[in-house]
Amino acid sequence: MSDIRQHRPPAEYRLSDMDKSLEGVVDRFVTASAGFERTLRLVCPDRWALPTPCTEWNVRQLVNHMTRGNINYVALLAGGTSAEFLRMRDLDALGSDPIAAYVASARECADAFGQPGALQQILDYPLGRVSGQQALAVRTTDATIHTWDLARALGVDDRLDPDLVAWIDDHLEAIYAGLAETPVAAETTHRFFAAPAGTLTREASKQDRLLHRMGRNPSM
């Protein structure tokens, strides 16, 4: 069985001139991708059409979004444009083996962003020109939140990695700084995600609070 965590890229990049709050983002991406993979491996053949909390996607479409996204991020590093990214984002990337396709895409993405200079590179991201470091931080957040979406769709354990949850929650403003839509306060729903927000109780967990910020309703 393949494990994304076995394919950590070389740590040969400099942190000068980068946001130190996003330091270690390659390893965090690997962790988030491995979490998505674990949940993905629970998808039975008859469950690909199940609805997800992302109402525009069923399970297969959500997994394709994650897989195609990884591929498109690698293309940005290779000089791809935002227009090409948008044109490609809904194309099927899963083929006949969705799990293998996702695992390969995550490994390729981690390897590409782990190369010297990749995190400093300025990318033509669809929501604004950003460094490779910030782009991968957005991708890490996407992988983490969509792991919860996939788990909810399947009715399996939806607990996320607590260190990832804490890191995203603590650095959400830095992760999305300067992009087209940015959260402005801790209680603000992040508008990149369209799922409805619920009402939090005083006893809500850190994970539930992050999900609420990201437009999810963990109480549903």
Image (tube, rainbow, N blue to C red):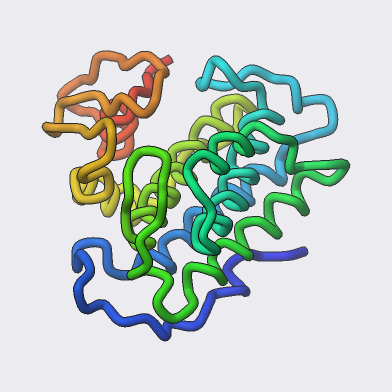
Quarter placement of the N terminus: bottom right
* Residue placed most toward the observer, 166 or 111: 111
Above/below status of 76 relative to 48: below
Q: Position of residue 46 (x, y in %)?
A: 83, 25
- In the displayed structure image, the side of residue 11 where residue 206 appears, left or right: left
At 51% from the left edge and 39% from the top edge, which residue is drawn? Answer: 83
Q: Position of residue 78 (x, y in %)?
A: 55, 63
Q: Is residue 218 visible?
A: no
Q: Position of residue 81 (x, y in %)?
A: 50, 48
Q: Residue lying furthest bottom in this view?
A: 12
Q: Is residue 17 visible?
A: yes
* Residue placed most toward the observer, 215 or 12: 12
- In the displayed structure image, the side of residue 95 where residue 77 appears, left or right: left
Quarter placement of the C terminus: top left
Q: How many marks?
A: 0
- In the displayed structure image, the side of residue 212 where residue 114 appears, left or right: right
At 63% from the left edge and 38% from the top edge, which residue is drawn? Answer: 88
At 37% from the left edge and 81% from the top edge, which residue is drawn? Answer: 13
Q: Residue lying furthest right in this view?
A: 96
Residue 4 location, quadrant = bottom right
Above/below status of 25 relative to 170: below
Above/below status of 127 relative to 4: above
* Residue placed most toward the observer, 91 or 199: 91
Above/below status of 61 relative to 116: above
- In the displayed structure image, the side of residue 131 where residue 50 appears, left or right: right
At 21% from the left edge and 78% from the top edge, which residue is drawn? Answer: 16
Residue 213 location, quadrant = top left
Q: Position of residue 182 (x, y in %)?
A: 22, 34
* Residue placed most toward the observer, 89 or 201: 89
